[in-house]
């Protein structure tokens, strides 16, 4: 794509006043359709941008305050003319955060090709219609922690490049591949390839006593509805985290989907890797 | 306290138009100081209010739209004059949610007395300066799931009656006791009482291979700083969830504190209860 920004060279780091069009454009990247059209997304905050600079993600522009530039002299020259010095007020105007944190980067969306080879002898998470950005972000962070390299989302799952998702990943989106696929076709193909498919459901096999938890695909569902009926049918085994609530009548209905993802990844990992003490 | 609301009897369920003072008062319960001063807090949404009505929590007023009243005829008479019929617009005015859900209840804060007997032969969670409302709410939901009856928070932990906390508990705040205490004194006393104290830290004993995970107190720390140095010193054993990230250099720093709470509660429970398959 053509670069939207034609700034005066910023290598001398003069403070740039963004035009209304530029502010509107960056703010509009909070919307999925605009991100998809321009193949761009936004990453904010000191720690995430620090990781971003050494990652394989292509950065179009970094908008930073003088505080950030002063603290990051070592990398400023390597960023070159992509670095735009802005005031705190300008940063506030383009940020999606209530308290922007010194720096915001506009990056190119990376398109990974999904292959079933990715799923062989590995744990892969499949998300069926997860809607809350913080949940997807937290699940990506969990995947990163447990060495899960691939997450496949149903096409109606919240967009990974939603700024709230990116924020909740705490940088893990740079290390975990996220794909969007029609789950019906994906799971049928996985089944033909002999990959085990586990569905997290409320009435499945007790995850603690189940004996057959091997590597494979783990499906997690929507926050209120769980896994859809059609997708659940394609799971070989339904698994559950049993509850131990003292109130067996009015007890809790469910765990948060990201917490469930964490517990399930923990249980699968504990069983499938050599644990060093 | 004196009842703030002096409504025309609502037993005939005439639509009430709230005064500006009344709207301001209910909205002001989003602030901790106002909640503490009036000993009141707010619960919103169909499912939570449904559970609330049959709980032991004292309800001062329920503000409901006609849609809620129509769907809840069976309980309407038992609520009596505490029920206030309001329009959707009025509900929007008193709600802390961007999309209010038919009903809002103003309830009395319950003051439980903490006793060390609560901790004997049980798992108790202790939170050191947890700040994000969604995290505390999710941890309360996890505690409920795993039968943890008591959570003790440091006095600088976010208030359990913060509307975002209440919302994230999905009703579990009704079944889990939450106390606020100075942790230093609490943990010293626990130690003298022979209660094991585990601290979740980044460099503790691998939780999967640790052999000594018995019931006791589990301490979890602040979102970015973890457990404070002074509190960590009072833990008998430091425990960690090991990470398996493929990137050992730029891998993730930590797990979300609620996810960590879920995994730790799962691991302790798995080891300490008879698991039925």
Image (cartoon, coloured by chain):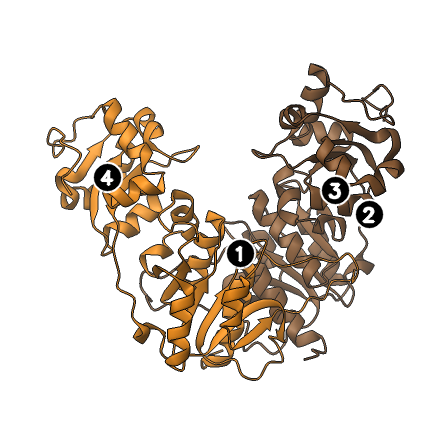
Chain colours: A brown, B orange
Q: Which labelled disc corresponds to residue A55?
A: 2
In the figure, is residue B139 to the left or right of A262? left
In depth, the one of B20 and A160 nearer the eye is B20
Chain hosting mark 3: A
Q: CA distance from mark 2 to mark 4?
A: 52 Å
Are discs 1 and 4 both within one chain? yes
- SS state under label 3: helix
Which residue lies under the disc numbered 4? B62
Which residue lies under the disc numbered 3? A49
Q: Of tags 1 and 2, which is closer to the observer?
A: 1
In depth, the one of A48 and B98 nearer the eye is A48
Which residue lies under the disc numbered 1? B222
Q: Of tags 2 and 3, which is closer to the observer?
A: 3
Are discs 3 and 1 both within one chain? no
- SS state under label 4: strand
In depth, the one of B222 and B61 nearer the eye is B222
Q: CA distance from mark 3 to mark 1?
A: 23 Å
- Position above or below: A29 against A146: above
């Amino acid at each position: 794509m053509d670069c939207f920004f034609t700034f005066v060279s910023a290598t001398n780091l003069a403070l740039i006043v963004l035009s209304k069009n530029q502010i509107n454009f960056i703010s509009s990247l909070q919307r999925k359709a605009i991100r998809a059209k321009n193949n761009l997304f936004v990453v904010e905050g000191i720690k995430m941008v620090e990781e971003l600079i050494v990652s394989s993600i292509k950065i179009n522009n970094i908008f930073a305050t003088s505080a950030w530039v002063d603290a990051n002299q070592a990398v400023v020259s390597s960023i070159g003319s992509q670095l735009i010095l802005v005031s705190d007020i300008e940063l506030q105007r383009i940020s999606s955060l209530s308290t922007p944190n010194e720096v915001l980067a506009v990056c190119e969306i990376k398109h990974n090709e999904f292959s079933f080879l990715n799923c062989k002898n590995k744990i892969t998470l499949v998300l069926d219609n997860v809607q809350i950005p913080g949940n997807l972000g937290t699940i990506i962070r969990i995947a990163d922690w447990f060495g899960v390299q691939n997450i496949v989302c149903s096409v109606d799952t919240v967009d990974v490049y939603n700024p709230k998702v990116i924020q909740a990943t705490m940088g893990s989106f740079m290390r975990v591949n996220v794909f969007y696929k029609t789950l019906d076709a994906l799971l049928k193909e996985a089944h033909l390839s002999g990959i085990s498919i586990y569905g997290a459901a409320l009435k499945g096999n007790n995850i603690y006593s189940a004996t057959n938890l091997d590597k494979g695909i783990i499906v997690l569902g929507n926050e209120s509805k769980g896994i859809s009926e059609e997708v659940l049918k394609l799971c070989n085994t339904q698994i559950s985290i049993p509850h131990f609530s003292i109130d067996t009548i009015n007890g809790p209905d469910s765990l948060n989907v990201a917490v469930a993802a964490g517990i399930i990844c923990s249980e699968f990992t504990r069983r499938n890797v050599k644990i060093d003490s």
